């Protein structure tokens, strides 16, 4: 009997209000219609004990030292890593709304001199590496104009501007060849169509015949 082909690991990234949740939903629905098994996850996962502390921090109810909250966000991904690996191994495609890219850029955007992008990426080394990371690119001004913006800790124009620049920096790095920028200013349907095209390319290519990689920054 031939082994079950592994699932794909697809991540959707972007600024707050870039449309990630809607696009993840649409992507999952499309993958299911294509006959694939799909698991939709998001980070931070606010339901675990670690996730609950992150949630109260994001709502401004508690304070945390910058490195401490950074490591809690990372731990929140690590606690889900065995589950991600198992889904992929058993043939389920995992779609994740935010992952270690957000982890690195949101913390580095705080401009703490002891928390650079290089420092911030280190705890993420070893996590399952996505086969595809779609960066929904939107200007910080357009993001701020979308409804619902401004509710949580990082939702200020200044912060989002720095976050966007750092995402652009990650896109340029040779270690992150799986990252693709998609114009999130296009209509919801246009963005979805572009994402479907990227999905088809991934499933038709050779990449999924190779084992899932671990993230390595070097
Ligand atoms: P969301 O639930 O997708 O709205 O994300 C909540 C906020 O947390 C959002 O402003 C992005 C930020 N965020 C997500 N992951 C991380 C992370 O790993 N580290 C830091 N510092 N911020 C993160």
Image (tube, helix red, strand yellow):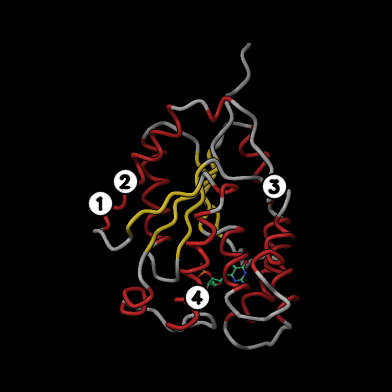
- Residue at mark 3 to residue at mark 2: CA–CA distance: 28 Å
Q: Earlier in the sequence, mark 1 or mark 3?
A: 1
Q: Tell me if 42 is positioned left or right of 148 in this view.
A: right
For label 3, count other residues whose C-alpha is less than 10 Å away and answer few (under 14), some (14-19) or many (20+). Answer: some
* Label 1 beta carbon less than 8 Å to ligand 1: no
The N terminus lies in quadrant: top right
In front: 143, or 116?
116
Q: Is residue 103 above or below residue 197?
A: below
> Which residue is tagged 4?
162
- Residue at mark 1 to residue at mark 3: CA–CA distance: 33 Å
Question: Cβ–Cβ below 8 Å for labels 2 and 1?
Answer: yes
- Residue at mark 4 to residue at mark 2: CA–CA distance: 26 Å
Label 3 SS:
loop
* Label 4 beta carbon less than 8 Å to ligand 1: no
**Residue at image coords 64%, 36%:** 212
Please state which of the two labelled residues, at mark 4 or mark 2, is closer to the viewer: 4
Q: Earlier in the sequence, mark 3 or mark 4?
A: 4
Q: Where residue 194 is drawn, which disc sits there?
A: 2
* Residue 64, horizontal then vertical, whole percent: 72, 83
């Amino acid at each position: 009997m031939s082994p079950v082909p592994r699932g794909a690991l697809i991540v959707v990234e972007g600024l707050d209000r870039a449309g990630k949740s809607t696009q993840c939903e649409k992507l999952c629905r499309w993958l299911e219609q294509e006959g694939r098994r799909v698991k939709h996850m998001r980070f931070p996962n606010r339901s675990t004990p670690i996730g609950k502390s992150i949630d109260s921090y994001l709502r401004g109810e508690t304070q945390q030292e910058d490195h401490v909250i950074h490591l809690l966000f990372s731990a929140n991904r690590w606690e889900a890593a065995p589950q991600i690996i198992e889904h992929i191994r058993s043939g389920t495609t995992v779609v994740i709304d935010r992952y270690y890219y957000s982890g690195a850029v949101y913390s580095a955007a705080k401009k703490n001199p002891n928390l650079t992008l290089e420092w911030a990426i280190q705890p993420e080394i070893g996590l399952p590496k996505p086969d595809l990371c779609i960066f929904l690119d939107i200007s910080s001004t357009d993001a701020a104009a979308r409804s619902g913006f401004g509710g949580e800790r990082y939702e200020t124009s200044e912060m989002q501007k720095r976050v966007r620049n750092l995402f652009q920096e990650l896109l340029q790095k040779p270690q992150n060849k799986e990252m693709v920028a998609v114009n999130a200013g296009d209509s919801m349907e246009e963005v979805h169509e572009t994402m479907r095209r990227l999905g088809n390319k991934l499933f038709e290519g050779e990449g999924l015949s190779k084992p899932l990689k671990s993230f390595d920054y070097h």
